Image: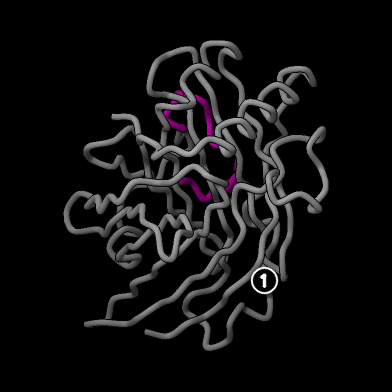
Amino acid sequence: MKRLASLLSCLFLAAALTGCGSDSKKIVSDLEFETRDQDSEKFVVTDFVMELGNAELPFLHLPLPRNYGYLRFYRVDGINRVAVDVNLTEILKLPRGNEATLPNGTMLPVDTMGAGVIEIPVSGINGKVYISHKDDMTLVGFAASIKQLDDIGNEMGTIGVFPNFDISGVNVTAGIYTSPNQGQTGLAVFANIGSLWSESTLASNYERDAFRAIPQRNSRWKERRLGRRLLRMKNTQQVLEISK
């Protein structure tokens, strides 16, 4: 398997939580992706390192339909990870929609500029895997609802906080979505990992704006309270439960 990139990314919940100086304010601390070619098909594994403090992700290996791949939650040396492992060649044959949604029913925080998004529900949980492809750029993402965050949705209603930032030439949109409905509040991450058909790590003509972040409009008090509640979760020793 050929390793293409490893990059450090700093994710902020809201404008009120800006600054990379505090580890407690990060949700994603690293991102790696690898590809392999097999029988004329392209496979890609995108591995997100989640900075969740004392909270721990469960060990889950969840197959996608029709052998398209897997969504995996796991820990290595106490570090939380989420891996999106997909057969990109087969998935890109599926119909693309312009109305892909997060598990809370809201639109994705990323505009594919007409390319559309392939969304694949994950059996056994309230979560999805997302793939888009435009101008040789590839967007890979996931969303997963977390039971311990349900009370945030009960208090906040339906909102989303999704900062967008560039790290080492790669554009990332990531954050939290909420809902007053049980099992519909959680985390979502999207990364434009560039060209996977190029010999170079990233295509020389990397198109940052192939997938544009959609600004989220929330009241500041909700963003501040959301940040405090998430920090409380990260400071609590617990195994998180992925909502079904």
Q: How is the image coloured?
A: one colour
**Does residue 216 appear to the left or right of 191 in the view shown?**
right
- Tell whether position 113 is magenta: yes
Q: Residue furthest left?
A: 66
For label 1, the SS is: loop
Q: Is residue 136 magenta?
A: no
Magenta span of residues: 102-117
- Which residue is situated farthest in the bottom direction here? 199
Question: Quick one: 22 or 139, which is closer to the camera?
Answer: 22
The C terminus sits in image quarter: top left
Q: Quadrant of residue 91?
A: bottom left
Query: Measuring 22% from the left and 82% from the top, which residue is drawn there?
Result: 39
Q: Amino acid at mark 1?
A: Tyr
Q: Which residue is mark 1?
A: 206
What is the tally of numbered marks visible in this picture?
1
Please report the residue visible at 36 percent of the width from the left and 38 percent of the height from the top: 127
In the image, taking residue 223 as reference, residue 56 lies left or right, namely: left
Image height of 62 relative to 121, above or below: below
